[in-house]
Amino acid sequence: MNQKISKRLETVASFVPQGARLVDVGSDHAYLPLFLVEKAVISYAIAGEVVEGPYQSALQHVRESGYTQQIEVRLANGLAAFDQTDQMTAITIAGMGGRLIADILEAGKDKLEGIERLILQPNNREDDVREWLEIHDFRLVAETMVAENGKFYEILVAEPGEQSLTSLEKRFGPYLLQEVSPVFQQKWEREADKLQHALAQIPTEHSIERARIEEKIQQIKEVLHVSK
Ligand code: SAM
């Protein structure tokens, strides 16, 4: 089987180190571990799933691919999918809300000793993920943003280490902010448009709420170097 995956997941995969022992949390269909095993990037992965349906489809997919020696599918909540004896070195958590990703890491934080890299792809609330990383002594080592099917996805790569982020960096991403790529520009222009639209619906007497949104818009303009 030649595993084809989305551009989003392929970008997540590109940050998995060669030879990593990978835990993929929320591994619906086990697409990501299968892709990495087929490409010989990794030779062992645990595909963790908390919901029976996606767990069964991951199991079936791994069986059909013939990689049952390389990929173990486990029915488990978050980081409960592995323990120290598995000697895992990297974790991917993709395609979920940022709040949920932070909650999964928080609930399993005692498992993170020995983990050399986290590759996280929140669908939203990226600031919550960056905040969690900062508090728990993980530092971002790379970030990228991809656009696919009209959506924007941020991929955050972190390793053990200290880092102090400003609130601007938490919202926009320290590396993404430096790069201001065309995709980044598009995402935040769209976000500013949405905020403008929201602002237009808020009556003038709701000045606190209006000021809060205006500030968000202004921050985007500054980041994108828009003068007015
Ligand atoms: N990671 C894949 C991707 O990026 O394409 C699948 C994303 S899918 C939208 C999210 C998956 O995470 C679902 O299959 C869901 O059952 C699973 N999930 C949600 N919370 C989880 C948890 N606490 N532990 C394990 N899996 C979880």
Image (cartoon, helix red, strand yellow):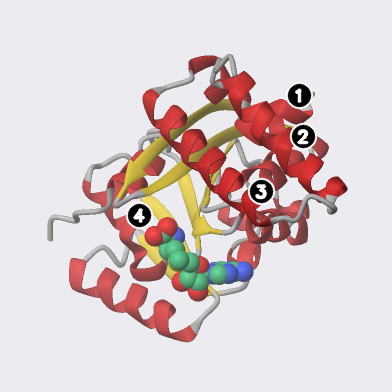
Q: Nearer the viewer, mark 4 or mark 3?
A: 3
Disc 3 marks which residue?
199
Cα distance in 3D space between marks 2 and 4:
26 Å
Q: Are marks 2 and 1 in contact (CB under 8 Å)?
A: yes
Q: Nearer the viewer, mark 3 or mark 2?
A: 3
Residue 42 makes an appearance in the image:
no
Q: Nearer the viewer, mark 4 or mark 1?
A: 1
Residue drawn at x 12%, y 61% as measured from the top left: 1
Disc 2 marks which residue?
134
Cα distance in 3D space between marks 4 and 3:
40 Å
Badge 4 crowding class, 10 Å Cα cut-off, few under 14, some 14 to 19, many 20 or more, is many
Quadrant in which the C terminus is drawn? top right
The quarter of the picture where residue 4 lies is bottom left
Q: Earlier in the sequence, mark 4 or mark 1?
A: 4
Q: Nearer the viewer, mark 1 or mark 3?
A: 3
Q: Position of residue 57 (x, y in %)?
A: 33, 78
Q: Earlier in the sequence, mark 1 or mark 3?
A: 1
Is 151 left or right of 218, judged from the image as shown? left
